[in-house]
Image (cartoon, rainbow, N blue to C red):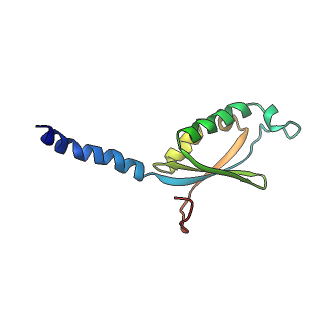
Amino acid sequence: MKTIALLLLFPFLMIGQESEKDKSHFVALYTVGSLWDMDKTPNDQPYFQEHSAFLAKLRKEKTIVMGARYSDTGMIVLEAMDLESARNILFEDIALQNKLFNVEVHPFNVFYKGCFD
């Protein structure tokens, strides 16, 4: 009886595993928005502490794969089901909602395998 129950549940278990593998990578490019005050340090900007906490939450959930900064641009690579989902995740950030930052989100396709999977 247990064997029959397991066989009946097997397809559902596989669907759950496939959904994790079906996630794609996206790159989010952050620049300062219209609310950013150039005369203030980052920690003195409105919503900056909340922004940092939000990104920490995404890192803890393993939604963020990596992050970096170059020039005046911040960059994170995240996993999501599709581009719309990636944007929706990021726009939960109150700093984006209030235009402390601007963000562009694009598909991120790795073509040289290495440390980044």
What residue appears at the point 35 percent right and 48 percent down from the top-left corner? 17
Q: In which quarter of the image is residue 70?
A: bottom right
Q: Quadrant of residue 9?
A: top left
Image position of 5 (left or right of 60): left
Q: Residue furthest right?
A: 39
What residue appears at the point 66 percent right and 38 percent down from the top-left corner? 96
Q: Where is residue 117 in the image (x, y as percent from the top left)?
A: 51, 58
What residue appears at the point 61 percent right and 51 percent down from the top-left corner? 66
Q: Quadrant of the image for the N terminus? A: top left
Between residues 13 and 49, which one lies in front from this camera angle? 13
**Is 113 placed above or below 75 here?**
below
Q: Can residue 16 be seen in this view?
A: yes
Q: Which residue lies furthest to the bottom in this view?
A: 112
Q: In which quarter of the image is residue 116?
A: bottom right
Image position of 81 (left or right of 30): left
Between residues 107 and 43, which one lies in front from this camera angle? 43
